[in-house]
Image: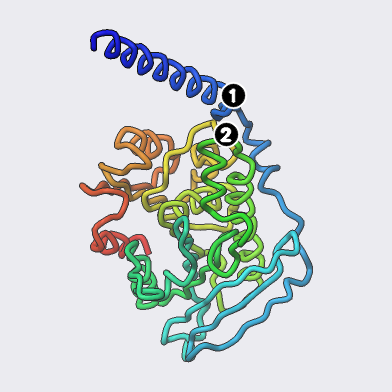
Amino acid sequence: MPFIKNNILRYTLITAIIILLAGGGWFFHFSLTPYQVSPEQVQAHYAYQAGNDLHWQQTKIEDNYYEFTYQSFDGQIVNGRIKYPVTHANSTQPMPVLIGIHALGRSQIRWFQDSFKTRPTITSVDKITQQALKQGYAVIAIDARNHGLRKDPNYSIRDVMMDLHYFGDKAPYEALITDTVKDHRVLLDWIAQQPQFDPLRINVAGYSMGGQASLLLAGIDPRINNVAAIVPPHLDDKTALVAPKNVLTGLANNKVWLLTADDDEYASKQQNSMLFNLIPSENKKHFRFDSSHILPSNYVDDLTDWL
């Protein structure tokens, strides 16, 4: 019996060592490597060729509520929705615009509905839309790349994140975020051409991945006036081109509100504080919540003055 026990212990120890060595080898070969980017490189990365004709098509859903499609910089068709305030028909003044950007794995429809396919909108971004409409904003949201009606059945978001975290392939993830930001820049081209919108009052708000994209869009494109980033994930220089910290110099003249959770699994309290401290704007606020990544629904009340 002692002999058998010793063999079992020896076998267990050898197996554990093999697993550790294999894990170490995997980490060495496939983990993400930090890299540096200059402000000029970041600007060049988010540059795009503006088209003369976006092939904008719009269909009425109900009064003041439309769905639309347009052609982005690379020929991709982007879908989204726009909702006007009830005062729209009688107003002669250009109205402010709120662009909403959804979370990872969600879609633009969450900005307009409290549930979708029986699943509630737990991020409560539909309530932000309600507030904005009451204050006279038009609200616009589109599907991010590989989300909603733009899903790739052969390469899902799960595949993108698996490749990022387990195989160190950052290219698909960085392309998803980058091209989503560029899609929004093309959307801004359309907004700028519409006389019903006030070009000096274009705000962007986003939840989670949307918070990340909101900071990137506002940091890159000066047409954004105010930005509300809600629980953006922490990203460092392992994905430098899509890390908000690398565009913050572009936010010096924006009103920037950061809403974070102290028990967020995607960004620690210290990381959130560091991000806020790096924002160069003098017109900034940091709202912290004692919650996980899903904030209590009343966080929306804190955005009233931001709008």
Query: At x 37% / y 66%, what residue is drawn?
Result: 125
Image coordinates of residue 260 in percent, x first then y, are: 32, 47
* 74 relative to 283 in the view: left or right: right
> Mark on residue 118?
none
Circle 2/circle 1 CB separation < 8 Å: yes
- On the question of residue 249 being in view, the answer is no
Q: Quadrant of residue 86?
A: bottom left
What residue do we see at 52% from left, 77% from top? 82
Q: Earlier in the sequence, mark 2 or mark 1?
A: 1
Q: Residue drawn 29% across and 8% down? A: 3
Asked whether, in this view, residue 62 is left or right of residue 223, the answer is left
Q: Which residue is mark 2?
A: 168
Quarter of the figure that contains the C terminus: bottom left
Amino acid carrying label 1: it is His
Instruction: For mark 2, give the secondary structure.
Output: loop
Three-letter amino acid code at the position of disc 2: Gly
In the foreground, 260 or 135: 260
Taking the spot 55% from the left edge, 40% from the top edge, the residue there is 164
Position above or below: 152 against 62: above
In the image shown, does 290 or 2 lie closer to the viewer?
Answer: 2
Q: Is 190 on the left-hand or right-hand side of 105?
A: right
Residue 16, quarter of the rendered image: top left
Image location of residue 20, percent across then percent down:
44, 19
Label 1 SS: helix
Residue 81: horizontal and vertical position, in percent?
A: 53, 76
Separation of marks 2 and 1 at Cα, in angstroms: 8 Å
**Outermost residue, right side:** 52
Residue 129 placement (x, y as % from top left): 39, 72
Residue indicated by mark 1: 29
